[in-house]
């Protein structure tokens, strides 16, 4: 077999990197590698190839790039687009040139929009023929979505949106319907507004299915694009800076130590305690002051937004394996100071007779029953766009990402019942309220989804 | 390398099986295999050996034997002790004879006590010399404990206890201090009173460390042995019968289907719903009628005791992987009718707006504060032996395994706060009470362990 | 994530099966499963889905289908096209109907040509929209190739070729360039003349790159298709019959036993000895009478052609793992009677002082030097089509698959130097000649490839 | 479960390291770690423990220690014996003190002999009781053997042998028969004369089975010990120096690049080409100048002896995976400059029409037939001790490790037939002879083992 084409999907950041090369020639490159790179080394070993290049399509904002790890560990040469925002040496990939990997080659297209320097890479293989058959689109074109242009600050957003229009409609779409699309992200990534759940597509399929590729003029496109755009996650600026400078070597997946209850308690005084258990488990009992960000798919996203990368993190998880997994997610977004995790889940804590906090978990029926009581404040922590589509009658709205800044506006005397789309973000918010001393807080599992399913009044 | 010696530890049943053989000769046997046998096939492949024999040291009561699976799948010949309780053909292993496995051999010792037919197997290897150097003791001798003689019914208990004395002091101990001991169980198994946490030992180390091998006369030994003996798990009789007849082929680890909330609800009408999440998660919110047996080490033991093997089981777990793991544990103890698990943990359920039950999780400090209130009944569900060593003042005692038979004695008007050693069994009990319509039930995480750690009054 | 799309590539048969479904709904199907199905069970477990259907696009000729295994092991329902050649119950998949798998669905297209009953399956996902975006083409359309129509016998070949024309140009191509193509085979499979090395493509890419989709009228297509068509592998008829009847349950990957040299020798009297080591290792020393089919990619193909499925097979390999791998390849093509493998590679054999045969390995330079000597017969064992493009001057041509039938035409007095494309098939032929008593046989590693690389006279 | 006891066996160096600790307390240490440490990190993760210490029992001579890797990667503190030969900071382990790991502890015994600083570690666990139950003996006591005292040079040998006597008979044996023995090496290691194939034993079993522990006085023991002691492998001095200074960080298992035939040929001019295929494969055809050290168990040992650690190494293997495995073995013994491996085994080389060398592989019967011919020189390359027990009549003896120094004594006009114990070392020798221009060389697979099995004249 000659063509090597191995997509590597990374959950949490919903990211797709690619090992691409020629097994006959024994050479390959990795496109947009993540930080924990053993998966690429394993792929190289399984296929008997040298990892000649570690390629970036652009300076990533949502995860720490693994190109430096690959350079260090596998001798790969870093390659990437032309940009002054890069602070390290690399093989420049200029529009029009080709990188040969045996019988396979990558041709560089400049496709600015998500970022100014962004490139896409056309894939050819000699066995197929002269023409390309696929394109690595990075964060330019996703399934059912396109890369957002607003991550570099408001002043650049509209200019980038216009560049994106050109990249999409003048560079990518003209490649033809038949061309396969290999994007850098799948559903769940905040690099698009609402990315689809396919990890691969074709230009033609995107033309048919994607709202973003509806025929519009440039102004219409820009308007469509920026409308309902959620605010950028707070941590993206930090990560982009890190990647521009050249991310520090991490040396592999972290292995934070287990801490006995007493040691954990001591360490917690100067740390952020993150409880990654499910919302019901957190509700049933947790360590005082802990914030609940459950270890499910959006974990990395919300951990990135809610945590301070400069302060140590302590983890509470159902089991050690979950703690390591959470630490790995944090590592991938550049939060490396995980000082430890609570030994043996909550069991050692419980057995030591230490205090447990609870947060009541109300069904939507309970919420509906109690929302008219005088001392209940219903708090909707969804984004503006979600709230615009409907809410629980009488609910107050504060987006979870702004909650800590707006605490003073909430009445501490009342019971606050928090809801979001499903209860996930509401549990983050509820735990924050408790940490800030709000005494009576309830979470609503199912939240807006359940409210609608139950046919309750909107 | 010639000698093949691979212990296989199986958690849940805290069981140790062994692949033993000669890699030069390409032959091996499995001693006391579990029911899901891929692990032995993998070991055979890794070492290039034929699995010639599937050996039982005795008719097991605590897990379904895998000898028939090995016969079917790998062509192994079943071998085991002489006993009329066996209902299938096998190569008989009579006291004194040797089974040759290349340069390795197993010599049969009759060591009755745990059961009448029980054998142990002396291990030799030609490279070492003429003498044996280790012994597979099955359920006769464990680390810090010996096999219990009371599983075949009261009428046989004392006679078996006397046989055990002889097996230990006249057969095994005389082998000499140097002889290595390879038992069938480790800590957590109910085949002994209180097995130690080493999975291997020596005759001499057991002589030094084990209470069971203290010098005593036969009467003294029998008395010591039967004192504080916990009652046999209810399911052992069923499994022993199954193994005696020849366990049905299971065909590998089960893969129960995920069920949507509605389908789950329908199926639950005729099934036992088992929630395997942690006690705090269960407390935070669960499906009505579910019993909580958390997927930790004693899961198989308590599932065996509390569930009806003839009724379908439905599972609730944090994630699909946990449900499969729980189903595997059940499979190993012969509970095969797992009709499905709740799709997507509790999330789909919550999002559908379906009802959630809660059980409050009290710390021991809360328990202590509230136990004097008139409407609180403190219920201790530990075993008699545990209770004998101390309890919460005023606590009523009903062993969890008897709870369903004694419900009528409890006052349904009161809040019942249940505790056990750590909260695990108390959560089983609390969920049972709720299922039987007790309206006000609390569990106490940490339970007696926390009570003592907190220095509360006894 | 909702859409589940997992291609499973199986080397040896260069086959691609697919697990396709909806993880949110917890349901999936397997399309064209292989016989050893653990990989699908693992995929189901990893994604928390029920395997509801085991689907065949057609009656396979090149590998034993795993649909019955999936029915038995996972409770999947078998589904497949309408055909009288099927001898078992299944859910019929009729042209035009849709199989729903949660939000994902498969629409049946009748695409005869490779076989009369062949169906393709259009893939839709609600998240994308109304239209399909991909098609499972089975053996109708591959990368750079199409399914061969000549496997059911000469009398049907041309009719099937015409149906294929219609399936391709009237059913598949009109789906549009954008449609993704998921075929059942990759490079190396004999289900096409010369399949490309991509395992996925698009209708448009195939239109651009594939010779088969060049615009032609029906007659022109049929002529192009049948020209240079290699003869069907001998074992395909046997496997097709097996699959039509319903393949017998295999119960998982085989684990043949290691045999000591003496036992191997005894067993060899009634068995086919297959040496799966490399051609150089075989040349260096081998067991008398062994046929050399090296364990590289075409192994399954040549083992299928050269071996008798009704006689026991004995294996010689560098190590046990290779023997198991070879046995698995044979299992996948329905050769189940692997009686064992030579223990410890050739080492035990060598150490026992047993006879070694050698076959000299000539470079092309040696071949060139010696081909003019009177007693050297140069034998080209490639296919007719390959020979037509050039050969070593003076070489005699007998296709390796016909060699055993044409032995009488070869001069036993001469040294026979055998070559093929690279030496692989030549080593099969050379070993056959030795088995039939030809005393002086040499193999030519590199063969025609090396001859050309060395610029020797053609 | 509390006690964590995980032996890690590393083939090639036949080494056993141990992860030992307390899972309840979440703490563990690694004793005598190898250089590629992922296995310990995986163990730590699986058990939820912190790797607090990386312990050496002595300065190893046969493999590069992984203590520095563990310090760097896992934050483990290095601990080891008192010795001026160490050039780096560490927690000193002085005789008599205890290292606590939760409820588990290690007590230091000074057991000089193999080296002056050597310590053993007594293992206790609170659950068992006060007394120790096992001892990590490092290279002091093995199964059926003891550590050799001659690796630090002749002048120290006898003094160390006397210290060993004391360590064995005054320190270890008095611990009592019951004490379990956990050694640092198994069969195949050159750290003993002839280590047994058990990886664990007891003091009592060694007393019964081991020649080394036969009752002798000190002089008798020293005489017994030094008699028949094979010469120390050449590379041990280099590795001991490296470990004393502190081995350089390796960063994980190496991934040498595949090289195309031309690039390989160029690189070979300044490198040592090592062909790790089996002796028969090497005999069948190989690259000119290659030395054959087959990738079987003694590979690391012979690679260490025969290769120059300061010159680049190029590998030839059946497949890439074997090349990586060989590179890992070399990495473990501090040979890090592996410049690449021949792409695609010998296939690309063959297909390029490049020259192949052959070495005829004679059976012992051929050897016997031809040894009386005038032009055949029979060369025995076994060690002195082996030769002393018998040889092929008329054979000349040169130990393979000395062969390159004694080439001038061999007659280049003759056919040289080389044999050893099984053909493995003879193939090393035969390939060396060919590299040095000897034109007519044959190897004898099976060699002395086959000669005896065939009953040929001695």
Image (cartoon, coloured by chain):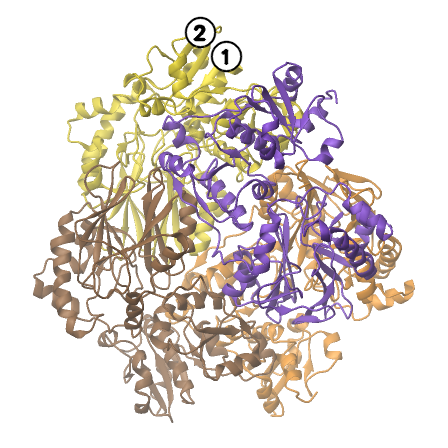
Chain colours: A brown, B orange, C yellow, D purple
Q: In which quarter of the image is the N terminus of chain A?
A: top left
Where is residue B74? Give x, y as percent. 61, 39
Dot 1 surroundings within 10 Å: few (below 14), some, or many (20 or more)?
Answer: some
Q: Could you say whether the residue bearing mark 1 is in a helix, strand or loop?
A: loop
Where is residue C4? Give x, y as percent. 35, 53
Badge 1 vs badge 2, beta-carbon distance below 8 Å = yes
- Reading the image, the residue beneath label 2 is C375
Mark 1 or mark 2: whose residue is earlier in sequence: 2
- Would you place residue C232 above or below residue B178 in this image? above
Query: Which subunit holds the residue at mark 1?
Result: C
Residue C19 disc label: none
- Would you place residue D91 above or below residue B309 in this image? below
Residue D450 in view in this figure: yes
Residue B195 in view in this figure: no
Residue C440 disc label: 1
Q: Which residue is drawn at 56% across and 71% down?
A: A344
Q: Which of A441 and C361 is in front in this view?
A: C361
């Amino acid at each position: 077999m000659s063509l090597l084409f191995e997509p590597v999907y990374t959950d949490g950041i919903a990211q797709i990197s690619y090992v691409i090369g020629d097994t006959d020639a024994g050479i390959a490159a990795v496109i947009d590698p993540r930080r924990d790179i053993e998966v690429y080394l394993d792929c190289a070993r399984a296929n008997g190839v040298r990892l000649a290049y570690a390629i970036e399509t652009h300076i990533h904002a949502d995860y720490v790039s693994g190109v430096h790890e690959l350079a260090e560990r596998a001798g790969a040469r870093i390659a990437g687009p032309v940009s002054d925002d890069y602070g390290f040496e690399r093989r420049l990939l200029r529009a029009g040139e080709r990188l040969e990997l045996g019988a396979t080659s990558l041709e560089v297209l400049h496709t600015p929009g998500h970022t100014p320097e962004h490139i896409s890479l056309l894939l050819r293989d000699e066995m197929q023929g002269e023409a390309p058959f696929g394109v690595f689109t990075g964060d330019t074109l996703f399934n059912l979505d396109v890369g957002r242009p607003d991550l570099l600050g408001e002043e650049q957003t509209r200019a980038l949106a216009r560049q994106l229009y050109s990249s999409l409609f003048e560079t990518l779409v003209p490649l033809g319907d038949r061309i396969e699309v290999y994007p850098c992200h799948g559903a769940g990534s905040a690099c698009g507004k609402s990315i689809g759940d396919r990890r691969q597509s074709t230009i033609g399929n995107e033309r048919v299915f994607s709202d973003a590729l509806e025929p519009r003029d440039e102004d219409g496109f820009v308007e469509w694009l920026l409308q309902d755009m959620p605010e950028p996650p707070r941590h993206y600026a930090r990560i982009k800076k890190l990647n521009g400078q050249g991310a520090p070597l991490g040396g592999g997946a972290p292995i934070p130590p287990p801490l006995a209850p007493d040691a954990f308690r001591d360490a917690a005084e100067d740390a952020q305690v993150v409880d990654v258990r499910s919302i019901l488990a957190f509700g049933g009992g947790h360590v005082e002051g802990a914030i609940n960000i459950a270890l499910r798919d959006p974990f990395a996203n919300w951990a990135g937004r809610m945590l301070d990368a400069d302060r140590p993190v302590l983890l509470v998880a159902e089991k050690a394996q979950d703690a390591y997994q959470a630490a790995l997610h944090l590592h991938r977004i550049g939060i490396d100071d995980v000082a430890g995790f609570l030994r043996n889940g909550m069991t050692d804590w419980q057995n030591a007779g230490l205090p447990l906090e609870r947060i009541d978990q109300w069904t939507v029926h309970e919420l509906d029953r109690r929302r008219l009581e005088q001392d209940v404040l219903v708090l909707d922590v969804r984004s503006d766009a979600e709230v615009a589509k409907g809410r629980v009658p009488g609910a107050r709205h504060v987006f979870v990402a702004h909650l800590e800044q707006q605490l003073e506006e909430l009445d501490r005397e009342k019971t606050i019942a928090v809801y979001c789309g499903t209860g996930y973000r509401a549990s983050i918010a509820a735990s924050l309220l408790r940490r800030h001393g709000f005494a009576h807080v309830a979470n609503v599992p199912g939240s807006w989804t359940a409210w609608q399913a139950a046919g309750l009044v909107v």
